[in-house]
């Protein structure tokens, strides 16, 4: 299925999965209800997901490069190996998200809440995590090279083998 540059604002999408090769590049999904949606390997590059509800969604290995997820809710979402390169996640709620090996290179995540998230081996190279809340997050082997961590709260986080080279605010 190919869906490009369509508007889905206010719609509920329960299942768009790998079986239909979901291609939502550039789609307008502002405020969409995507709770528990199957978006495994979905192509969401450049999609507008501002304020979308992605609680419990399966976004494993999804392409979210350049997507706008400002104030989106991804609580408990499975975003393992997803690519958020240069995505906007300011004010996003990623509490308890499964983000193992996810890529957040150059992502903007100011005031994002990643409390309790599993960020094992995730990459935040040059990401802006200023004033992000990352309390009790699992950051084992996580890369924060050249990241902006000014005002970030890492209270109780497991930083075993994390790489924090040239990060701001550390």
Image: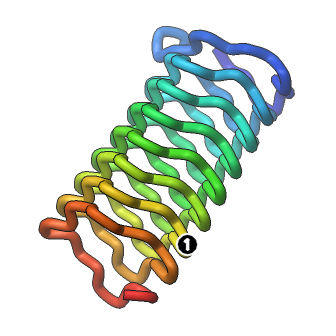
Visible residue check, residue 68: no
Q: Nearer the viewer, residue 137 or 140?
A: 137
The answer to whether residue 140 is above or below residue 83 is below
Q: Nearer the viewer, residue 136 or 65?
A: 136
Category of crowding for the residue at label 1, using alpha-carbon neighbours closer than 10 angstroms: few (below 14), some (14–19), many (at least 20) = some
The answer to whether residue 3 is above or below residue 114 is above
| Residue 8 horizontal side relative to residue 148, left or right | right
Residue at 61 percent across and 11 percent down: it is: 14
Taking the view exactly as shown, the residue that stands out farthest to the left is 161
Query: Which quadrant of the structure image shows residue 30?
Result: top right
The answer to whether residue 89 is above or below residue 73 is below
Give the labeled residue for mark 1.
131
Instruction: Tally the numbered discs.
Output: 1
Residue at 45 percent across and 53 percent down: it is: 114
- Asked which secondary structure carries label 1, the reply is loop
Q: Assign the N terminus to one quadrant of the image.
A: top right
Measuring from the top left, give residue 152's x and y in whole percent: 47, 73
Colour approach in the figure: rainbow
Measuring from the top left, give residue 7's x and y in whole percent: 86, 27
Measuring from the top left, give residue 57's x and y in whole percent: 50, 25
Residue at 82 percent across and 23 percent down: it is: 8
| Residue 9 horizontal side relative to residue 103, left or right | right
Residue at 24 percent across and 52 percent down: it is: 120
Measuring from the top left, give residue 29's x and y in whole percent: 76, 31
Q: Assign the C terminus to one quadrant of the image.
A: bottom left
| Residue 169 horizontal side relative to residue 70, left or right | left
Query: Which quadrant of the structure image shows residue 96?
Result: top left
| Residue 10 horizontal side relative to residue 20, left or right | right
């Amino acid at each position: 299925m190919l869906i490009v540059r369509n508007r889905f604002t206010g719609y509920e999408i329960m299942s768009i999965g790998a079986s239909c090769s979901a291609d939502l590049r550039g789609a307008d999904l502002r405020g969409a209800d995507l709770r528990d949606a199957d978006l495994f390997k979905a192509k969401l590059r450049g999609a507008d997901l501002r304020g979308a509800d992605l609680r419990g969604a399966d976004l494993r290995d999804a392409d979210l490069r350049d997507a706008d997820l400002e104030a989106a809710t991804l609580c408990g979402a499975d975003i393992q190996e997803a690519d958020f390169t240069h995505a906007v996640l300011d004010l996003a709620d990623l509490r308890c998200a499964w983000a193992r090996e996810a890529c957040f290179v150059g992502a903007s995540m100011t005031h994002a809440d990643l409390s309790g998230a599993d960020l094992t081996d995730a990459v935040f190279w040059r990401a802006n995590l200023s004033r992000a809340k990352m309390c009790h997050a699992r950051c084992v082997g996580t890369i924060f090279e050249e990241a902006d961590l000014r005002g970030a709260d890492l209270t109780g986080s497991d930083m075993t083998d994390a790489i924090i080279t040239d990060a701001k605010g550390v």
